[in-house]
Image (tube, rainbow, N blue to C red):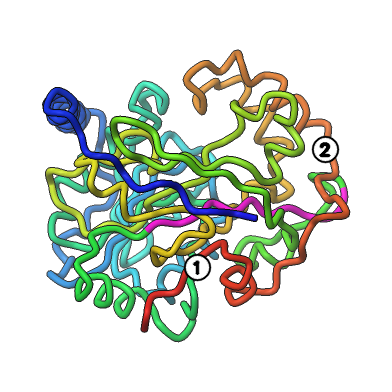
């Protein structure tokens, strides 16, 4: 049902030249963006050479962060580098009180900062060089085959031994059965206790030139919100875990990277490259109120006016469940469905 994308083609000399300059421009943007960050709590002196880091940009995620932090601590993240983009729900103070979290604040526009990438790239340049670095959103929970037995230190050691500098994942939208917003969720609760369902497919993948980045689409958001215009549905491939080098840069969220060879690390659902799944918890009950706010803020799309109808339909509290919906049982199920692939532990 889900087949891997083709391999990356070789770049022409002109393409390689343009991409080198693009990478330098993006790194320069990140260097300039450091002035938009003010320190709230800097504990980076605690970072040890072998520590696995996580970088996030967040705003008003007080409900999600307790589980987020506990999940990634269990996996093996040693230190969190967080940019708070003007929270007013207390999440910034909660983060600043954590012994393994460093926090910076920015009140500048999220969209103008390449959807936060300028800020996170600066932190990676400054603090993540030589470290395995996880770049995720607060609503993304990374799992992979046997993750409970093999934490990130084991996974990254395997990747190092096999000469792999990146680890890809499918962003898998989870949703409840019943109208959005009708459920209840407590801070710290495992979100999969509320969001128990997903679409097993279809997912389609192709490579984009000249970056060679994967483009995966499909799933529930396409089915429910973009059935008439599937080309506008969300991009679902990500490269969340990377052995960071200060020359690296994300180009479009964590969907694509430069240098372009990094994009070969993931070949999509049905592929053979070792990969995981980012359980996407976007549809927790607060999604209804948050969608109203985010439509007004207009910070999450290149052309926010094109997605007003998308927000309006979420605010109406649709039921995303359908007869083809699959109940989530765990990582082994997702591996069996071909949505992620195990390393050869």
Q: Is residue 192 above or below residue 5?
A: below
Image quadrant of residue 196? Answer: bottom right
- Seen at 45% across and 74% down, the residue is 342
- Residue that carries the numbered disc 2 in the rendered image: 317
Q: What SS does tag 2 mark?
A: loop
Q: Horizontal and vertical percent for residue 21?
A: 13, 25
Q: Nearer the viewer, residue 172 or 92?
A: 172
Q: Residues within 10 Å of mark 1 (few under 14, many from 20)?
A: many
Q: Which range is magenta?
A: 168-178
Q: Horizontal and vertical percent for residue 302?
A: 47, 20
Q: Nearer the viewer, residue 56 or 273?
A: 273
Work out which quarter of the rendered image holds the C terminus and state it. bottom left
Q: Earlier in the sequence, mark 1 or mark 2?
A: 1
Q: Is residue 137 above or below residue 23?
A: below
Tell which tag, 1 or 2, sits nearer the viewer: 1
- Residue that carries the numbered disc 1 in the rendered image: 143
Q: Horizontal and vertical percent for residue 289?
A: 71, 35
Q: What SS does tag 1 mark?
A: strand
Q: Horizontal and vertical percent for residue 13?
A: 11, 28
- Seen at 88% across and 54% down, the residue is 323
- Seen at 54% across and 54% down, the residue is 3
The CA span between labels 1 and 2 is 28 Å
Work out which quarter of the rendered image holds the N terminus and state it. bottom right
Image quadrant of residue 339? Answer: bottom right
Q: Is residue 121 above or below residue 96?
A: above
Q: Residues within 10 Å of mark 2 (few under 14, many from 20)?
A: some
Q: Nearer the viewer, residue 328 or 162?
A: 162
Relative horizontal placement of residue 303, taking residue 105 as reference (left or right): right
Relative horizontal placement of residue 337, taking residue 206 as reference (left or right): right
């Amino acid at each position: 049902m889900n087949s891997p994308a083709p391999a990356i083609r070789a770049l022409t000399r002109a393409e390689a030249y343009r991409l080198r300059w693009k990478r330098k421009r993006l790194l320069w943007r990140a260097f300039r963006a450091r002035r938009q960050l003010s320190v709230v709590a800097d504990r980076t002196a605690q970072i040890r050479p072998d520590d696995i880091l996580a970088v996030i940009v967040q705003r008003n995620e007080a409900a999600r962060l307790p589980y987020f932090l506990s999940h990634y601590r269990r996996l093996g993240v040693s230190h969190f580098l967080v940019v708070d983009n003007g929270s007013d729900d207390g999440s910034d103070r909660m983060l600043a009180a954590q012994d393994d979290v460093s926090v910076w604040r920015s009140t500048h526009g999220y969209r103008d900062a390449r959807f936060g990438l300028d800020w996170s790239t600066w932190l990676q340049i400054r603090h993540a060089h030589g470290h395995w670095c996880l770049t995720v959103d607060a609503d993304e929970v990374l799992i992979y085959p046997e993750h409970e037995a093999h934490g990130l230190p084991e996974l990254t050691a395997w990747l190092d031994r096999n000469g792999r500098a990146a680890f890809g994942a499918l962003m898998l939208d989870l949703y409840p059965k019943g109208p959005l917003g009708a459920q209840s969720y407590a801070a710290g609760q495992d979100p999969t206790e509320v969001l128990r369902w997903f679409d097993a497919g279809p997912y389609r993948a192709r490579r984009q030139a000249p970056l060679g980045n994967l483009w995966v689409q499909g799933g529930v958001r396409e089915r429910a919100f973009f059935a008439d215009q599937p080309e506008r549905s969300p991009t679902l491939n990500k490269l969340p875990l990377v052995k960071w080098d200060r020359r690296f840069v994300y180009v479009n969220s964590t969907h694509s990277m430069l240098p372009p060879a990094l994009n070969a690390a993931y070949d999509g659902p049905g592929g053979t490259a070792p990969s995981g799944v980012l359980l996407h918890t976007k549809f927790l009950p607060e999604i209804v109120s948050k969608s109203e706010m985010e439509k007004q803020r207009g910070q999450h799309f290149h052309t926010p006016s094109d997605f007003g109808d998308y927000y309006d339909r979420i605010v109406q509290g649709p039921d995303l469940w359908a007869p083809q919906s699959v109940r989530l049982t765990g990582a082994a199920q997702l591996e069996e469905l071909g949505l992620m692939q195990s390393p050869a532990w």
